[in-house]
Amino acid sequence: MFTIVFNPAAGNKKIDQVLKKVCDILTGRHINYTTFEISAKQGPEAYQAIPCGNDDTVCILGGDGTVLHTFNKLSGDSFRLLIVPCGTGNDFIKSLGLPKDPIKAFISQLNGDTRHADYLTANNRRFLNVMGAGFDVNVLCKLNAFKHKFSGLKAYLMAVIQSIKEYSPIELDINADDTGFVKKKLSIISIGNGRFIGGGMKAVPSAVPDDGLIDVVEVRAIKRWQLLFLLPLFICGLHIKFGLGKSYRCRSLRLASSGLTYQLDGEIFSDDSVTVNLIPDRLRVFK
């Protein structure tokens, strides 16, 4: 069974055109399909009609947020996942090496073979790409608010300026692979299965989605004025090379900090403690 799941409210306003082209391609190849419209407000019961077995393909049209919500509400994880990037960031497909054009990405996957990849969970919420906390997440929170007042680059710059004004490092206890908690003070922590966030910022430069490991990048606590130097390095993935942080790999990670605000694939959550686990080799994606 081939099921197309699409979010009409995804960041790309041309999603209706993309959906039509996808359906035309499948019809031309004599592939039977069904379409399923979803929104972030729908509960898990709304997804029960979507086939999710070993021989089923779930094709998601939308951005990283749509993929996150859909993946969490589908039952099981043994289906084949095909992603058509129609959001604002579309970051996970970059780590899969897929084209950013939605139709080119769709055709590339449709013509390709399946491969196994990993995914992660944070307090049992499944995610594919990157979890993060700290300064970059504060910018994301501010950006969500400023989007209602400004558009495009101006909204982002306003979010950055406001976040710099309010900046303070985060304090948290970190336990990697049950080796014991260590108290740390950081500007940013990024935990990745994929490499990119925010439409192309290389937060976790060495992450590979099929290596059976979690990549962690810790950016040390810096002064407010140093953020101006951190930002361009962070965007290019050079923050580790220039000594602003360090990276390591593990298979599980526990974070503890009162009221910790964090993001999973661009969606905001808050908890006092977060347990991140690796689910290796379970995701089936197209190459």
Image (cartoon, helix red, strand yellow):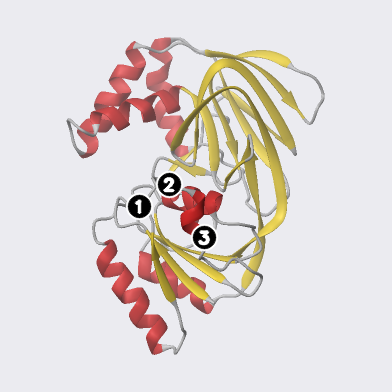
Disc 1 is placed on an element classified as: loop
- Left or right of 48 in this view: 256: right
At 64% across and 14% down in the image, what residue appears? 184
Q: Earlier in the sequence, mark 3 or mark 2?
A: 2
Task: Give the spatial CA distance, label 1 vs label 2.
Answer: 8 Å
Where does the image place residue 62, in percent across and percent down from the top left? 38, 56
Q: Are marks 3 and 2 in contact (CB under 8 Å)?
A: no
Mark 1 residue type:
Gly
- Residue topped by disc 2: 65
Foreground tag (3 vs 2): 2
In the image, what residue type sits under mark 2? Answer: Gly
Q: Which residue is found at the position 55% from the left and 56% from the top?
A: 74
Tell me the residue that label 3 is attached to.
97
Among all residues in the image, which is located at the extreme right?
Answer: 179
At a point 31% along the width and 30% down the height, the residue shown is: 143
The picture places residue 242, in percent across and down from the top left corner, at 54, 26
Kind of residue at disc 3: Gly
Tell me if I can see residue 55 in this picture. yes
Q: Indicate which label's residue lies in the foreground, 1 or 3.
A: 1
Please indicate, yes or no, whether residue 186 appears anywhere in the rendered image.
no
The relative height of residue 34 versus residue 44 in the rendered view (above or below) is below
Q: Residue at x 73, y 49 (%)?
A: 212
